[in-house]
Image: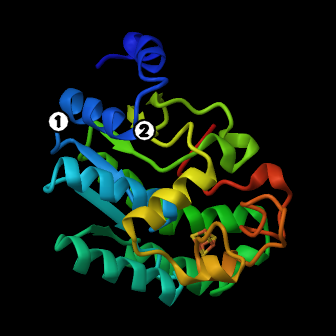
Amino acid sequence: MNITELEQLNESYMDKSPQEVIKCGIQNIGKDKLVLASSLSIEDQVITHMLLEIEPNARIFFIDTGRHYQETYNVMNSSMERYRFKYEVYSPSNEKLEDMICKHGPNLFYESIALRKKCCTIRKVEPLQRVLSTSNGWICGLRRGQSQDRERIELFEWDAQNKIFKINPLAHWSEEQTWDYMRRENLPYNSLHLKGYPSIGCQPCTRAVEEGEDIRSGRWWWENSEHKECGLHRS
Ligand code: SF4
């Protein structure tokens, strides 16, 4: 796989299944240099299931920000039991965390966008950069229908920020297709989805949404919509 082939790859895989997209990623990048980013969302649970069926020794990582819901850890645990595998877990630097909380307090994210981004950088982006530095490609559960920012994502992309390939096997799937697969395979999911939480991140920065509201509107709800990414995915 090289950058100049991406457009052609996206065209030829347009009508192929997510499993075929994943297989193409493994063939081109290699199982040891390709990592799946899992936040335990329904999309990540679907891809985890597909990926482990294709490659039982696949690398799947979780960023433990330290502020997740207990329900999220429960999904992680259920998945480990179901597949008998271990996640690669990445945590923020203790030193930076201590310094940030000493200077700005535990709830700094509500004070300003700059402080919220600082928290996301220390708790999410820096651990992500550590895992991505061991990889040549990452698989993500992004879907075009998730938000305006994501409506132009492709199956295969070059992630210029991290300088590796990025594969979005569910780019063209709807939320309904994702749930259909979850139910058909009886996959573990976060019980908060049944309480109005379509998109679940850290506990202090996530809330339930009303029926019909944008699925990411419960994330950083106090900010304007143009700021609603944590730095893991840039459009
Ligand atoms: S989502 Fe909230 S708590 Fe989690 S890293 Fe970002 S600002 Fe911090």
Image point (32%, 33%), residue name: 20
Question: Which of the two labelled residues, at mark 1 and mark 2, occupies the earlier sequence position?
Answer: 1
Amino acid under disc 1: Gly
Q: Secondary structure at mark 1?
A: loop
Q: Secondary structure at mark 2?
A: loop
* Tally of marks: 2
Residue 139 picture location, percent across and down? 38, 45
Horizontally, residue 145 falls left or right of residue 185, namely: right
Image point (54%, 39%), residue name: 171
Image point (48%, 30%), residue name: 160
Q: Quadrant of residue 110?
A: bottom right
The answer to whether mark 1 is within 8 Å of ligand 1 is: no
- Above or below, 173 against 59 in this view is above
Image point (48%, 15%), residue name: 11
Which quadrant of the rendered structure holds the C terminus? top right
Q: Nearer the viewer, residue 128 or 99?
A: 128
Dot 2 surroundings within 10 Å: few (below 14), some, or many (20 or more)? some
Residue 230 picture location, percent across and down? 61, 57
Q: Quadrant of residue 211?
A: bottom right
Horizontally, residue 235 falls left or right of residue 94, namely: right
Residue 96 picture location, percent across and down? 46, 73
Residue 120 picture location, percent across and down? 58, 64
Quarter of the rendered structure image containing ligand 1: bottom right
Horizontally, residue 31 falls left or right of residue 17, namely: left
Circle 2 is placed at which residue position? 162
Q: Nearer the viewer, residue 119 or 96?
A: 119
CA gap between label 1 and label 2 equals: 18 Å
- Above or below, 96 against 114 in this view is below
Circle 1 is placed at which residue position? 30
The answer to whether mark 2 is within 8 Å of ligand 1 is: no
Closer mark to the observer between disc 1 and disc 2: 1
Amino acid under disc 2: Asn
